Amino acid sequence: GQVCMAILSLLPATKDRFQSASQEFVSCFDDRGIFSSALGAFLLGVGMSLSGACPGMVLPQVGAWVPNSLFTLLGALIGALTYGLLGSHLSSLTKPKICFQHKQVHEKLDVQYAVIAVPMAAVVGVAVFCLEWFWPNNKDLESLGRLPELESNIITTIAWPPYVGGALIGLLQVPIILLVNDTIGGSSSYVTVVAQMFFTKNLQQKFRYLADKRSGISNWWQVVYVVCAIVGGALSAASSTSFGVAKGVPVYMGLLGGIVMLWGARFAAGCTSGHGLSGMGLLTWLSFIAVPAMFAGGIVTAFSMQATGALDTYVTAMGDVS
């Protein structure tokens, strides 16, 4: 994805469109600072550990009929609604006194985007290669007893290699940038869905955060995107005969995790897709803070669950992968 964006930034026919989409993305951090990005992402990591999902991942889980994934989705919608009711007040509280003068790394260094993006993509590519070399993706499938059958093909196999799936997701940046002047993200779609309940002028004036997310292609393209993710998950599960095969978390953990992760994503103005794929891909300073904070939230939650014995129940429900 980052390589594709670097190419778009250099081609005469697309560089203006790329720059416009890049500025559209970083504008969502106008009222965000280090504190809100770090705390929100930390909460997102907590919610991800509890639910075994993220705002984008829960959608194909629902399509593949992963047990209790619907409760995680419900929790995410509740989180979007409750955050939306307080969004305007929270924005005023979290807005930093001094904003970043340069929101992206290449702007600060006064170089072209591609000068940093291409080497960064190369480093990430090497890391992915090493990870796959020392820990092949089939190792996880083997521990679950779900190794691809010899006669399976790209349609019927139980899982694609992570580097293939990741590359395909990254390629989605191209049509999204060119067609809707935006970048990959998912958590805003939940706000757009729940905002449809606020259809009167009185409610819209009272809850401006939700009102701003109700309409327009800039909001609704994400809803189409996430619906397609559900359909894609269903088609994948159907073609590989894996409906309901994956284990799910308990209902209460899915529901709570969904609420917490959406609160975190909205507080940080981005989720795993927004910060992890688009934000870091666009060399955004706050995303380089948010992504480590997500990992920290997940790790702290896992160790806390282990210390209290809750992790045993979680592993029993999810199935151990070792």
Image (spheres, grey):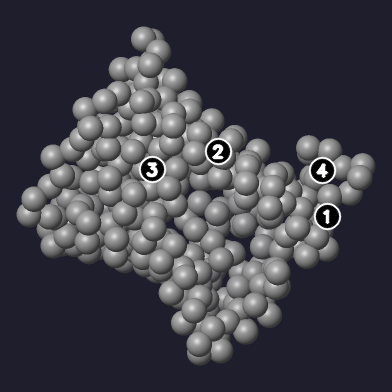
Distance between the alpha carbons at the discs numbered 1 and 3 = 33 Å
Which residue is under mark 1? 147
Distance between the alpha carbons at the discs numbered 3 and 4 = 33 Å
For marks 2 and 3 on the same chain, the one whose residue lies earlier in the sequence: 2
Which residue is under mark 2? 125
| Mark in front: 2 vs 3 | 2
Say if 134 sits above or below 68 in the image. above
Distance between the alpha carbons at the discs numbered 4 and 2 = 27 Å
Q: Residues within 10 Å of mark 2 (few under 14, many from 20)?
A: few
Instruction: State the image quarter where residue 179 is shown.
Output: top left
Which residue is under mark 3? 280
- SS class of the residue under badge 1? loop
- SS class of the residue under badge 2? helix
Toward the right, the furthest residue is 151
Distance between the alpha carbons at the discs numbered 1 and 4 = 12 Å
For marks 2 and 1 on the same chain, the one whose residue lies earlier in the sequence: 2
User: Is residue 59 toward the left or the right of residue 76 in the image?
Assistant: right
Q: Which mark is residue 311?
A: none
For marks 1 and 3 on the same chain, the one whose residue lies earlier in the sequence: 1
Which residue is under mark 4? 156
What's the residue type where badge 2 is placed?
Gly
